[in-house]
Amino acid sequence: MPALAVALMLGALKVGVLNPISSVMTARFNALEDSILRSRGDSFMTVGQGGLWIRERTEEGQHVLHARAARQNDAELAQVLVIRFGHQDEFLERLDARSAHLKPGYWELRDVVVTSTTGRPDVRAAIRIPTHLTIQNIQDSFASPETMSFWELPGFIRILENAGFSAVKHRLYWHALLASPLLLTAMVLIAATFSLRLTRRGGTLLWASSGLFTGFLLYFMSDIVFAMGLSARIPEVLAAWAPASVTMLLGLTSLLHLEDG
């Protein structure tokens, strides 16, 4: 019981205190890596309560795109606003569109109202804006779950889902953090199964090796289940909680069998 209590406290400390600290440091590392090593300065994307914001530089200058909602499956944005600037950051025109579809190499805006520097609106059926982005780039550019603390993830998950994007990765990571204290206590039970056996019976090296192999096997299976949840083959809640729950049941069963002789 003392070992289980310590494992639970360590798990709670990891989730509530260490995870927010590590998320801040990971986010800072990713920002430095993108700006220094990968030189990703041509585009910037963020999602918030107001929708999706994208800033991108092209051969014609740069533009800022804002959309209220999105449908990820067919790469369609709704209620789109685009402001275009020249190479010297001078205002060129404003585009208000009913929708925007991401095609290979360009955005296709439909039912567009164009407002140039003259201030006169011009209605057009469709306009193309060049882009280097893909739907995968947009999805990957959102903050990864590792860069967000345990306390921030639920709000960010709601924002992503309201904007029309998939939040499977973030929801799975959040449930995995919740289940980590249970997984630690389960590993304590597994360790007790292999360490409480009387050493005078011999086979100590075999039992220690079996314990190590079992630990690696459980973590390996946990990664497999996590990957299945990430690919939406199984529900996220099941993928996050199943490894900890199954390990706990195995540990309890093995320990009770050992105690009963």
Image (cartoon, helix red, strand yellow):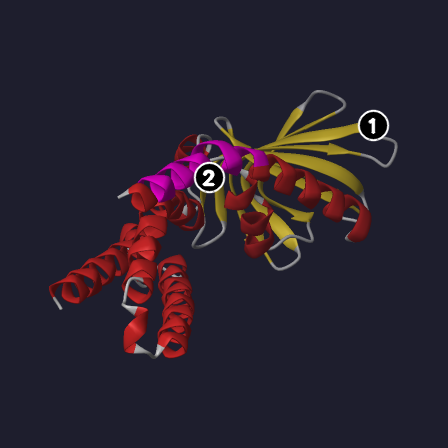
Vertical arrangement, residue 200 with respect to residue 137, above or below: below
The quadrant of the image that shows the C terminus is bottom left
Taking the image as drawn, is residue 143 in sight?
A: no
* Magenta part of the chain: 5-21
Q: Is the magenta stretch mostly helix, strand or loop?
A: helix
Residue 3 image offset from top left, x and y in percent = 33, 46
Residue 233 occupies which quadrant of the picture?
Answer: bottom left
Residue 193's label in the rendered image is none
Residue shown at 50% from the left, 26% from the top: 50
Describe residue 234's horizontal placement relative to residue 224 as left or right: left
Residue 221 image offset from top left, x and y in percent = 37, 67
The quadrant of the image that shows the N terminus is top left
- Assign a secondary structure to mark 2: helix
The one nearer the camera, 176 or 34, is 176
**Outermost residue, top direction?**
119
Residue 70 image offset from top left, x and y in percent = 46, 42
Question: For mark 1, does the 10 Å Cα neighbourhood hold few (<14), some (14 to 19), or many (20 or more) residues?
Answer: few
Residue 90's label in the rendered image is 1
Residue occupied by mark 2: 14
- Assign a secondary structure to mark 1: loop
The one nearer the camera, 56 or 243, is 243
Vertical arrangement, residue 220 with respect to residue 226, above or below: below
**Is residue 18 in the magenta section?**
yes
**Amino acid type of the residue tagged 2 in the rendering:** Lys
Describe residue 1's horizontal placement relative to residue 217 as left or right: left
